[in-house]
Image (cartoon, grey):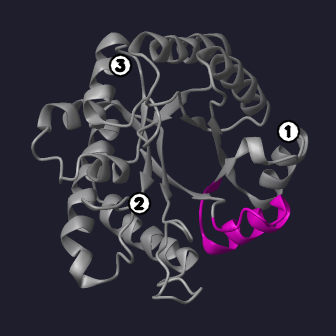
Amino acid sequence: MKLLFTKADWELARLPLSDFAACVADAGYDGTEIYLPARRDSAQEIRRLHAAAGLGMVAHISTEGNTVEDHLRSLEAHYLKAVEIEPWCVNSHTGRDHFSFEDSLRIFEKGQILIEKHGVPVFHETHRGRALFSIPAARSFLRAIPGLQLTADFSHWVCVHESDLSDQPEGLDAAISAAHHIHARVGFDEGPQISDPRNPLHEPWLRLFTSWWKRIVRLRRDEDREFLTISPEFGPVPYMPLNGRSQVAVADAWEINLWMLSYLRRELDAE
């Protein structure tokens, strides 16, 4: 199984897509993870720019609106646009944490119908504020839809639960078993992002997250998957703290993600 490392357009979101793709290719990534609703480029242009840079794609979408009907409509609209750009997969911020279980289930079921019809997989991200905001919530949906597949961003869960998740092993196991895309950001019990994974003081959290990512890699490899996509995803301000009262961040997100790219290749390729 090949590990494909993708670069989210978070800290470079203001760049034209052609410049972003060039930066990503020059940095040695295999592809991009672009937030599709914010891009005005046509599907044809997105495909052309990625092909020219020798890159693949993960399409990042979100469901939006005040009602479940709004979320159902936006899921379909964004997914169909994603299909046109021919990505490896779609990563979705799905639903809201305050929707009822039944309403959220309708959104996930709509996603499964779209996958069956069009063939491009959707991985729903474990994200604060969304339907998969916690381990118990995710476990309920995984039980209801056995084929549901996730983007593992466990940085949100350590923050939501204010723990290292060792008190919820069965739920974490279920999420790891369902994870098919990884957002490789390291959180801690009081926040979704440590300031710098290169700091030795953060090493226990880095090693814990790495152990979870290794489990995902081993599972997908045992299934003889063709590839697994991974996005180093340390974010800029406001995810990145500011240094005191200054307007300067404590670290540079682009540099940290490059360090994570090297670290992950070293740690995960051997799995």
Q: Residue at x 56, y 70 (%)?
A: 236
Residue 33 higher or lower than 65, as above or below = below
Residue 144 spot, x, y in % from top left: 34, 11
Q: Mark 3: give few (<14), some (14-19) or many (20+) Cα within 10 Å.
A: some
Q: Nearer the viewer, residue 58 or 53?
A: 58
Residue 67 spot, x, y in % from top left: 62, 19
Q: Magenta stretch? A: 11-32
Give the amino acid at mark 3.
Phe
Q: Residue at x 40, y 17 (%)?
A: 147
**Left-right relation of 206 to 39:** left
- Of circles 1 and 3, the one toward us is 3
Disc 2 designates what residue?
185
Q: Nearer the viewer, residue 152 or 31?
A: 152
**Left-right relation of 72 to 263:** right
Give the amino acid at mark 1.
Ala
Residue 239 higher or lower than 79, as above or below = below
Q: Residue at x 40, y 32 (%)?
A: 132
Residue 208 higher or lower than 213, as above or below = below
**Left-right relation of 202 to 113:** left
Q: Secondary structure at mark 2?
A: loop
Residue 43 numbered tag = 1
Q: Quadrant of residue 82?
A: top right
**Left-right relation of 11 to 108:** right
Of labels 2 and 1, earlier in sequence is 1
Mark 3 and mark 2 in contact? Answer it, CB < 8 Å.
no
Q: Residue at x 30, y 83 (%)?
A: 199
Disc 3 designates what residue?
141
Q: Secondary structure at mark 3?
A: helix
Q: CA distance from mark 3 to mark 2?
A: 24 Å
Q: CA distance from mark 1 to mark 3?
A: 32 Å
